[in-house]
Each structure stands twice: as structure tokens, then as C-alpha cells.
Image: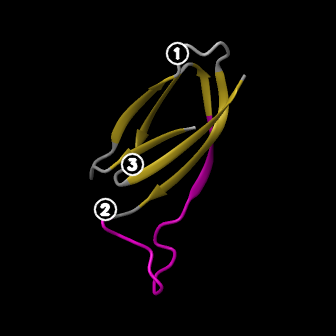
Amino acid sequence: IVKVINTSGKPQPVSLYFDGLKEGLREGTCIRLQSAELEQDNTLQQPSLIYPLESSVTINGARLDTEIEPYTFVIYKFVKS
């Protein structure tokens, strides 16, 4: 499990390295929480402003190159090959 946060208002390139694993990684899940504004919260009036989006991720070997959107919290869950 890897957690990445972009508190910037601009997209940020990210490279995640998993060197030292006896077995490489292959596939996993990405759970993303993203907001249009850093100070935005869910409220009783607007309970679905921020919600998790889940997608699949494929990684070959020991490196994942991606870009994290502005004001985004991402959780990556990988499975060993």
C-alpha cells in the first residue's frame, strides 16, 4: 500500500520505485479522492463533493510513472507477482 498526496494546485509527475522486491509487482488498485479546492469538505447540504474513485493499475517490474491531479489523495494497493 502506497499513499500519495498532491496539495498543489497543479498536476505533479510522480515516479514510485519498488526496488529490492524479490518478486515484481504486476497489478493493483488505485483509490483516488480529489477536490476542486484544497479547503473543500463534504457537508450535509453537499454530501458527495469528495468521494472515492477506484480504478485498476498495471505496473511492470519495480517502477510506476504517473501524474497526480491537483488537490488529490491517492492510495495504491499492489499485488506481488
Q: CA distance from mark 2 to mark 3?
A: 12 Å
Residue at image point 51% right, 74% down: 48
User: On screen, 27 above or below 21?
Assistant: below
Q: Which residue is mark 1?
A: 19
Quadrant in the picture for residue 38: bottom left
Mark 1–mark 2 CB contact (< 8 Å): no
Question: Sequence order check: which comes first, mark 1 or mark 3?
Answer: 1
Q: Is residue 33 left or right of residue 30?
A: left
Number of the front mark, 1 or 3: 1
Mark 1–mark 3 CB contact (< 8 Å): no
- In magenta, the rendered stretch is 37-57
Q: CA distance from mark 1 to mark 3?
A: 25 Å
Three-letter code, disc 2: Leu
Q: Which residue is mark 3?
A: 69
| Element type at mark 1 | loop
User: What percent of the width, then of the height, locates residue 26?
Assistant: 67, 26
Q: CA distance from mark 1 to mark 2?
A: 33 Å
As for residue 13 lying within the magenta part, the answer is no
Question: Sequence order check: which comes first, mark 1 or mark 2?
Answer: 1
Mark 2–mark 3 CB contact (< 8 Å): no
